[in-house]
Amino acid sequence: MTMNVARTGLWMSAGQWPHGTAERRDTAQELAELGYGMVWLGGATADLELPAAVLEATEHLCVGTGILNIWTEPVDLLADTYGMLEKAHPGRLLLGIGAGHARTVEAMTGRRYRNPLNAVVSYLDALDAVGIPQSARVLAALGPRMLGLAARRSAGAHPYLVTPEHTGRAREILGPGAFLAPEQKVVLEADSDRARGIARAALSPYLDLPHYTNNLRRLGFTDADLAAGGSDRLVDALVAWGDMDTVRARLDEHRAAGANHVAVQLLTGGRDLPREQWRALATGLDLRPAAVAGAPSGAAG
């Protein structure tokens, strides 16, 4: 499978999307018309109900799941729904898969959280057995071992809560041919106090999760950086805030470091869909509908 995605996509929680059929259709069509090549849906489930709605509403918009949790998403259900969607919308669905976090997994399932690397390997084995190809999946990989697994057993990686420096390290491990699509948080706000306030509110839940904090420590951040919602240094490294030139420069840093595609998560401090910011970003980045580049084998332009 060869998927066509533009260099810039949007990352958003599935919970942000409207529930009504017409509203979902209109939202997906708006994103496609603005020129976004791909939308990543955080919190999507193996029934792929929301990805299906987005695919059915548009002709070219690609969808990635960010992420499907291996502990909660049944392989058989995923195989059935993926097969139907791939037949109806070939080459437009990419399955982002990952191990989640011990605290949330144990709370949701009541099961003990065991070695995540081994658990992901077992899940990938199961995906192989039901016929979901490696080219249709990427891993939510942060550390060197999970990135190495992504290179061997999937199309590439979709790292979350990372910096351009991490993108460079990930590219070295993945090699030149893998698809690399980091998530990048953005606040279109020039006032530093307001921008950092919005950023800290979004970052705070992640700064107590070992997968993320261990990765940030590998990048040189300290316990002091991780405390109290994050130091200014940490906030500024993880969230691109300011005017469009600042945002564009951060996205270019990821690309220069080896990213094929950057999934932008627009933060506003509110719960509503950031439609105004979608339009501003699309205009500022000069996006064009159906401007595509080949991936996961590689993307540019």
Image: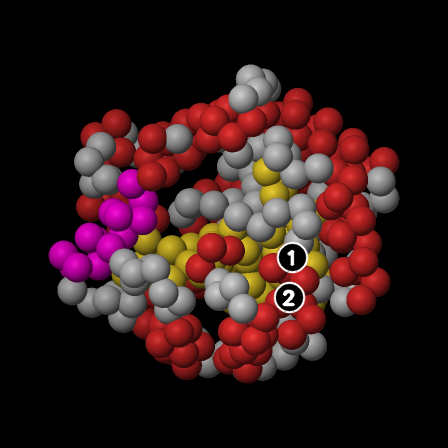
* Residue 95 coordinates in the image, percent (x, y): 67, 50
* Residue 226 coordinates in the image, percent (x, y): 27, 34
Left or right of residue 139, residue 13 in this image:
left
The answer to whether 285 is drawn above or below residue 294 in the figure is below
Image quarter in which the C terminus is found: bottom right
Callout 2: few (<14), some (14-19), or many (20+) C-alpha neighbours within 10 Å? some
Residue at x 20%, y 67% (from the top left corner): 190
Q: Nearer the viewer, residue 99 or 164?
A: 99
Residue at x 80%, y 66% (from the top left corner): 88
The answer to whether 254 is drawn above or below residue 108 in the figure is below
Residue at x 66%, y 54% (from the top left corner): 48
Question: Image quadrant of residue 57?
Answer: bottom right
Of the numbered discs in the image, which one, if any, rests on residue 53? 2
Q: Nearer the viewer, residue 154 or 17?
A: 17
Confirm whether the magenta stretch covers residue 197.
yes
Q: Main secondary structure of the magenta part?
A: helix
The magenta span reads: 192-204
Kind of residue at disc 2: Ala
Furthest residue toward front = 20
Residue 110 visible within the image:
yes
Left or right of residue 139, residue 274 in this image:
left
Element type at mark 1: helix
CB atoms of marks 1 and 2 within 8 Å: yes
Image quarter in which the N terminus is found: bottom right
Dot 1 corresponds to which residue?
A: 49
Of the numbered discs in the image, which one, if any, rests on residue 241? none
* Residue 299 coordinates in the image, percent (x, y): 64, 63
Residue 301 visible within the image:
no
Residue at x 29%, y 67% (from the top left corner): 188
Question: Image quadrant of residue 203?
Answer: top left
Element type at mark 2: helix
